[in-house]
Amino acid sequence: MASMLPVDLRRPTFFALAVLGSLGAALVGTDDVQAQSRGILPQATHLPASTRAMALGDAYQMGSGHADAIFYHPALLSGASGFGLDVQRWSAEGSAVAASAAMSWFGGNVGIGVRSMQFGSMLADLETLSTQDPFFVASSVPVSERIATVGYSRDFYFGLNLGVAVDLVDQRVGSQIHGVTLFDVGVSRTVGPLVAGFTAHDIGEKPIIDTGSAPARYTLGVGQYGRPLGPLDVGVAAQIGLDHADEITWGGGVEVGYWPVQGRTFVARLGVQNVPGGSEASPITAGFAFWGDDLTLEWAVRPFSGADDGGTHRFGIRFR
């Protein structure tokens, strides 16, 4: 079975954590983030934060052991390590960047993440923004989101892992600035050949979308990679969620890896996920990855009808 062999990266990972921590402090600490008016629910917490997950119908690969678990299921930080960087584009009008790092600390694992997103939207559309389609369209009102995340996970009894993540959100709509603090809380466990996790996302007061302090959504995910099938390694991932409007979201996918040489693995991915009403998004997602020892290069795409470049593309690089 092909896998990326772990090495002792404590020093580089610590450096990455320090850099991300400094960047996160700069993102949310350089301006007054007191809410000046009614704010908006951050879009970045609902969009893909992992290239691998995006290719699998935005279902996070629960057995990946990567630091970007902090954005999906903080309980999966247990055993996570390394550093990752992802960039996503919606033609020339919208973009997003995510970076994450994780390492062992005080009997558990700590992770730090940073997400940044820019797009345009009419002010009247922000309260009902529920699809990615507007990110392809130029608008006179610029919107940006910058989120610094700190998470911690620890093994518990009965094989359970418990995790929590804190999001410090800096939201800008035109000349207005909005600041919110949100929390994710979750649990994970190995169940037979799969890893399962359940997380409540975005707990805390959320401006504009009047949902109070209750979680914006709940997500249940399962997955694992590495089951041999002849000369191939096969992985699966699936997720189902319930959002603040009591609407069900879902997605899942399959990935197949081939390693002609030990330490050199080529992975093809195909996924499917729900399409929100009124969206021109395709239900199909796809991607490709190359694993070279401790370095991973990834690409994912979700087609949109009429979009430049055929849809939205995401690229990722990570080190273990």
Image (cartoon, rainbow, N blue to C red):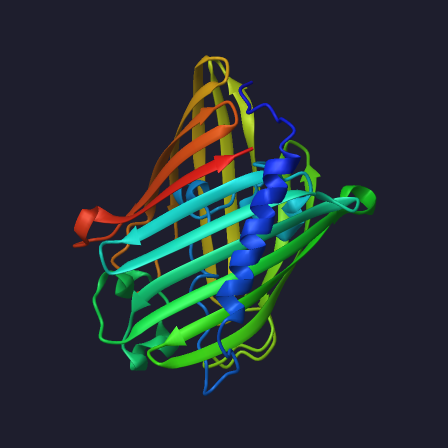
From the viewer's perspective, is 13 left or right of 262?
right
From the viewer's perspective, is residue 74 above or below residue 40? above
Residue 312 or residue 178, whichever sits in front: 178
Q: Is the N terminus in the top left, top right, bottom left or bottom right quadrant?
A: top right
Regarding residue 219, the answer to whether it shows in the image is no
The front one of 134 and 320 is 320
As drawn, is 89 to the left or to the right of 66?
left
- Residue furthest toward the right? 157
* Front in this rendered view, residue 42 or 24: 24
Location of residue 9 with respect to 309 vertically, above or below: above
Using residue 40 as the reference point, say whether residue 100 is left or right of it. right
Answer yes or no: is residue 276 visible: yes
Q: How many marks?
A: 0
Q: Residue at x 39, y 34 (%)?
A: 269
Q: Quadrant of residue 276?
A: bottom left
The x and y percentages for residue 200 are: 61, 61
Rendered residue at 43%/38% (across/down)? 317
Residue that lies at the very extreme toward the bottom in this rendered image: 37
Figure quadrant of the C terminus: top right
Q: Residue at x 60, y 74 (%)?
A: 204
| Residue occupying the point 29% across, 60% down | 94
Query: What percent of the width, then of the height, locates residue 277?
Result: 32, 64
Horizontal side, residue 126 vs residue 296: left or right: left
Query: Residue 314 location, x and y as percent?
Result: 35, 45
Residue 225 lies, in percent from the top left, at 54, 30
The residue nearer to you, when weighing 257 against 15, is 15
